[in-house]
Amino acid sequence: MRDSPDVTVLRLGHRPGRDERITTHVGLTARALGADRVVLAGAASSRADTVVDITDRFGGPFDVATTDEPKRRIRDFSGTVVHLTMYGESIQDVEGDIRTDHETEPLLVVVGAEKVPFEVYERADYNVGVTNQPHSEIASLAVFLDRLFEGAELDREWDDPDQVVVPMETGKKVVDPEDVEDV
Ligand code: SAM
């Protein structure tokens, strides 16, 4: 988030047809839960416009980038690389060390789709499991970011939204940002 070094989420792999919504949701989750940027690799790039559109409507800053060389991006990343995988060390055992690293260094968080190449496990500074059970890149990313920011991302404010959701006990209210003070 704004006062700490950048957090980039890299979506590695994407099966056209099967992974469309999942890749979109990786991008939206990265944005909503405090990352600064999502990088969509290869075929995942097709989902960039949707994430950009949500950022335009609901606010930023949030950057959407694409790459055809994700492995090089991971290899050459200048900072701490975290790879989320069910085979990794338990998040509750390493989250403190990752937070300490992130006080001074940018973070690259890698999530996969299908089998992740072993060189990613080797390059990663941390291979992190959110439970060691199989589930999803969206769930693991959400839990990871919330642990990283210790909940502070929930109070984040957004720049230049076209529309703002007003929290309600029941019903749906979406207003022009200029009207937020009046609600
Ligand atoms: N065998 C894969 C793995 O290494 O976790 C499961 C593939 S899963 C369909 C797709 C992605 O979800 C993985 O690449 C990983 O980023 C994430 N994922 C699934 N379960 C996870 C867990 N328990 N902890 C962290 N990440 C997980």
Image (cartoon, rainbow, N blue to C red):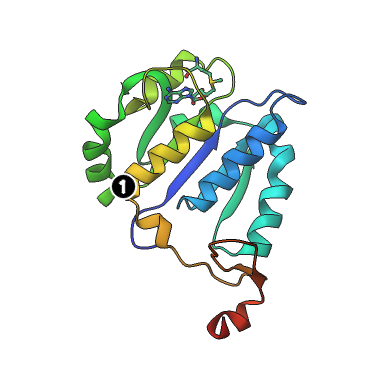
Mark 1 lies on a secondary structure that is loop
Badge 1 density bin: few <14, some 14–19, many ≥20, Cα 10 Å: some
- Residue at image position (77%, 26%) is 17
Of residue 98 and residue 156, the one placed in the foreground of this image is 156
The relative height of residue 44 versus residue 170 in the rendered view (above or below) is above
Of residue 165 and residue 60, the one placed in the foreground of this image is 165
Q: Position of residue 148 (x, y in %)?
A: 33, 44
For the N terminus, the quadrant is: bottom left
Quick check: 132 left or right of 175? left
Q: Position of residue 111 (x, y in %)?
A: 50, 30
Amino acid type, mark 1: Glu
Q: Which residue is mark 1?
A: 105
Q: Position of residue 3 (x, y in %)?
A: 34, 62
Q: In the figure, residue 93 lies in which quadrant?
A: top left
- Residue at image position (71%, 41%) is 47
Q: Position of residue 19 (x, y in %)?
A: 69, 28
Q: In the figure, residue 39 lies in which quadrant?
A: top right
Quick check: 174 left or right of 138? right
For the C terminus, the quadrant is: bottom right
Of residue 22 and residue 80, the one placed in the foreground of this image is 22
- Residue at image position (63%, 62%) is 171
- Residue at image position (27%, 39%) is 98
Residue 77 in view (yes/no): no
Confirm or reject: label 1 Cβ below 8 Å from ligand 1: no
The relative height of residue 81 versus residue 56 in the rendered view (above or below) is above
Of residue 135 and residue 116, the one placed in the foreground of this image is 135
Residue 10 in view (yes/no): yes
